[in-house]
Structure formats: C-alpha cells, structure tokens
Image (cartoon, grey):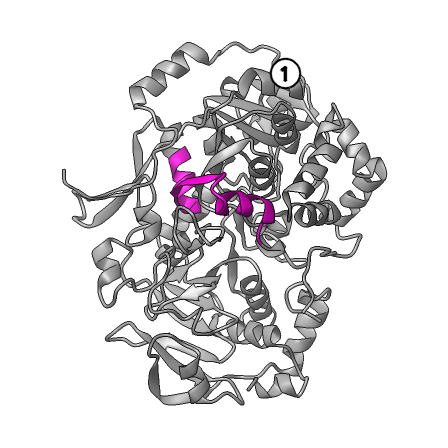
Amino acid sequence: MDVLQEGIGELIGWHDPDDAREWVLKNKSRELKDKTMSVREAVSSFVHDGDFIASGGFGHTRVSMAIVYEIIRQKKRNLIMAGKTAVHDLDVLVSSACVNRVEVAYSFGHELRGLSPGSRRMVQTGQCKVVAETSNAGYQWRWLAGMMGLPFIPGRDLLGTDTLKYSSCKVIEDPYSHKPIALIPAAYPDVAFIHVHRCDIYGNAQINSNLVEDFELSRCARRLIITTEKIVDNEIIRREPWRTCIPFLVVDAVVKTPYGSHPCEMPGMYYYDEDHIAEWLNLSKTQEGVDEYLQKYVFSVDRFEDYLKLCGGIKRMRYLKRREFFQEPMTAPWRKEG
Amino acid sequence: MAIKGIKEGKYTLREFLAVNGARVLEDKKSVFVGTGLPIIATTLAQRTHAPNLLMVFEAGGIGPQLPELAISVGESRTFHRAVAATSMHDVMSLSQAGYIDFGFLGAAQMDMHGNINTTVIGDHDLPQVRLPGSGGANDVASFSQRLVIIIADQSKRSFVKKLDFLTTPGYLDGPGARERAGLPRGTGPYRVITQLGIYGFDQKTKRLKLISLHPGISLEEVKQNSSFEILISNSIGTSPEPTQEDLIILRQEIDPAGIVLGK
C-alpha cells in the first residue's frame, strides 16, 4: 500500500506489537498481590532516566502531583513526556530539567490562566525539545492503539496540516473508501501515573469523574503507578465491579496520597489551589524563581504530607473542598488586569 | 475607532464578542467548545435563544449545566449536572462519526482560508514564541460540521498571508482541499468573529468574506487590519449589540468575577 505522506516527528514509545505482547507476558504479573508502597519507592522502582512518561487526568484536573514532585526530588533526568494536555505537571517537570523532550498535543500553557513562562523558556532556549506534534485526539488514539495491541489506529483528523507534517503519523489511501486516512501509531509509555478516588491494595481503581484518557492510558503503559485518595477493601470493589475502570493486572504500584492532586483539582473532593498556581506562574518567570519554588516546596520536604502543610495544611484543604462545592467565590489571582 | 457601544461605556469588547458568538449558535444542535470566550458564548446562547443547545467538552463532559465559569475544559464544572461524564475517546469518536454540529474555538493567527496557528511563532525547532499546540483544536476543526472562530484582535499580525505553522485546518489551500486531504465531507469554518466584524467564507473560493460590520466600524478599518485581501459581501449587515438581558446574564450569572469578560 502506498504511503501518501509521512510525518517527520520522532516516533516515541512505539513497539512492534509482538514485542509489546512479549514484554507484557514477561513483565506484568497476574497475581492478586499487595502493591502498596511509598511515593519514594514507586518512583525509584518504576521511573528511570530516559523514560517516556505520561501523566493521567487532564490539564489541572486529577493529576498525580505527589509523583511529579517525587520525580523532581529524585532528580530524574532526560525524560520524554507526553504533552497530552499536560499543563502544571509538564510545566514543573520541564522547568526543573527532569523532562527535556516533549511530544506536544497541548503543552506550555495553563488554559485560561495563560502561557507557562517556565517551560516555554526551556523550549525557546533549546533546553527542551519538541520532538513531535499531534492533537488531543491524536494522542488519545496512540494510547488506544497501544491498549488494543495494534500497530496503529486510523483517524480522520490531523490531515492536511503542519501538525500532521510534524507528527509521527503516516497517511495512506484507505482501501475501503479510497480516501486518504491518517495512521496514528501506537504508544506505550515506559511509565504512567494516574490519580484516582479509590483503589484497593491490589490496584483495582475507581474514578468518580470523567475518565479523560485514563482508560486507555492505564492499559497501554508498561508500568503504571496509581496514587489514590483512599485505599478501600477489595470487598468494596467487588460489590460494584462495574465502577472499576482500571483492573489490578495493569497496575504496578498503589500509593495512598490524600490530596495527591494538589494544587490541581480532584473532582468532587477539592478544587484548584489558584493561589498556589499563581505563585508558581509568577515565580517561574525566571530560573531563579523556579529554583526558589523547588527549594521551598520540593527539596525542603521529604513527604507529600509536609508539602501540604507548607501549602496551608488542613485549613487550606477544607477551603478547597468548599470551593469545589461552590461554597466559596471564584478567584483568579493570575488574571492580568485590563 | 472602536465599536460605538464600547466607546459609550455600555459594554466591553469581550461582552460584545460573547454575544455575537452566542447568536451564531442554534437551538437543538450540539457544540464542541474550547476554553474562554467559547464557553461563555455557548452558556449565554443556552440561557437566551438556545435552551436545548448541547454543550460537549473534549475531556468527556456531555450536556452539563454549568454552575459557574469553567477554567478548564476538563474540570468538574464541565460535567456538573451533565447527562454523561465519559472520556476523550468517546467524545472525539462521536465527533468523528458526525454528532457535532458546531465547533467553537479561539485563535491567535489565521489565514484567508480560515486555517489557524496555535503552535509556534518563528521556526518550529527553535521558536521565537512557543504556543501550546493544537490541543483539541485540530480535532474540533476536522470533525465539526461548522466551525466558529473568535479572534479578539484582528490586525496585520493576526490575519496573515502565510501562517508560521498550520496547526488546525480551515479550508487548507482552497475549494475541495479538505476533501482531497481526507477530512470529513462538508466540514469547515463557518464564521469568524473579530473586534471589527463577522465573516463567512465565499462559497466558490473558500476565502474569508465580510458579512457584517460591528456598529461604528468602517469597511476601511477591516481592510487595513489584514495582511490578505478580505472579500466583501454584496450586502453587509450590522452586527447585533448586546441587549440589557444579555448583559445581565453575562455579568451576574456567567462571569460575575469578570475573569474572562473583564470588569
């Protein structure tokens, strides 16, 4: 079949489907065993220099920030990150020089809050490379092909644009409709980290909100760290198994981290900490500011609980809970006047 | 020259843009919305002429009743009292399969065929300014039957002859180009709303065409604030002004803190 067009973006995290199966057969346990561990242990066991990493949730919502901070604390380097509407997580990881390559669907911005000064500076000075472009559906469907054990999935987006030209997709003539169609290659992150509402010690996880890309991402990632607001008994999971969106056999680590998404939102539990996000956006305007932030919130503390105390502790968390339920007014401390 | 009502202090530019964005949308249709003004315009449409307009968000929110302004298209507000909170795969697949009537995006740089750049200014590999990239925009513009674009500052810098990077497809290089590239048949940009006027696309050439001027704006201003030649409709209308009801809804219900609309 003729390839009509070939993107020049670097093909990140692709494996031959037989090699991918073989890796799973060799490395993923089907044993129902206790996978609980500390944040430190999860990161030192499953995140390695040079890995292709992916973070769950979307934007500033349901993000495994406890893992993000620990990656910085352990000074992981040379990471490639999936820019799948990765916002605060990616901004902090690029600014702290842990991630130096990104495949971008949406990165270097904070949606309504504006652009990310820290990670943009790293890109504009050549310290972080954009190795490929894609779109949100384009990325999502890389996970889908991966979880299905397929080499690619066809899509009718990206076509005709520079986004495709700088992607790792190919375009062929579809043998059925005889129209051009994009082939979106599978992706298998070396490690993904996803924050959930509840999970048992084996890794059976339930999410009380939109799943975004996490159904697919959890299944295509080679290693998966689940951070969870709450650990529940396996009996609770078995009572309503239809609520489980991630089954234990794809999970490698379970880490209990209440408020583990802070300063990002956890739907139905706590809202964005806009003051904290604004502090980051302000400090990250300079490299000195980035260093100041990291010293204050990452390197000076050992545990996520201590970080939370620095952010205002239980009083602040209660405020964020009231904010989630509209009992406090909206604030936008990052807003530019005018 | 500014829009007459803005000079007179009756409303702000963003309020004007939100109202005109809302007016384009139709009742009993679906709209795939992006961050910022599109969310506000869609909510206003729902609370005025289009109560059964279905709002869809890329992270999986389908048919929410927004209790307050959503900062992100993935947060809990985007599925508050929704009919479903599913996934990106679900929403993007529905879009690809033809369930989305309107796409609604903001943009910074556009060419005469409605193609959009949100990736880089300058060279791709070492850019002058790195922008966030496509996000869901390429998908929304590929799959929505009719795409609506808001550009708040039309100028020679934002209406360009050649984009630094073609992130999101308009009519690509002209008539038939979308279909030749493999994009779904009959899709494409429908309206562009700026601080000066409202534009459609010429049927034959698929080029940007002025169809309505905002009150107090001259044709000359429209032409001056573009690096490419804008086609002019034979019968140019006057864009509607916000009504008192619109302004009350915008200021008291949708964005009382003035986060997007300003104060």
Please give the name of the residue rendered at 83% of the width and 36% of the height, measured from the top-left corner.
A314
Q: Name the quadrant of the N terminus of chain A.
A: top left
Residue extending furthest toward the right: A315
User: In this rendering, does residue A90 appear at all?
Assistant: yes
User: In this rendering, does residue A235 appear at all?
Assistant: no
Q: Name the quadrant of the C terminus of chain A.
A: bottom right
Residue extending furthest toward the left: A1
The residue closer to the viewer here, B229 or A62, is: B229
Indicate the position of residue B126 as horizontal and vertical percent values: 42, 47
Indicate the position of residue A7 as horizontal and vertical percent values: 28, 43
A130 is within the stretch colored magenta: yes
- Crowd around label 1: few <14 · some 14–19 · many ≥20 (10 Å): some
Residue stretch in magenta: A115-143
Relative to A161, is B119 on the left or the right? right
* Chain identity of mark 1: A
Please give the name of the residue rendered at 55% of the width and 46% of the height, measured from the top-left corner.
A121
A97 is within the stretch colored magenta: no
Q: Quadrant of residue A332?
A: bottom right
| Residue wearing tag 1 | A41
The residue closer to the viewer here, B58 or B180, is: B180
Indicate the position of residue A261 as horizontal and vertical percent values: 67, 36
> The residue under label 1 is which amino acid type?
Glu
Please give the name of the residue rendered at 55% of the width and 57% of the height, measured from the top-left corner.
B35
- Whether residue B234 is situated above or below residue B33 in the rendered picture: below
The number of numbered badges drawn on the structure is 1
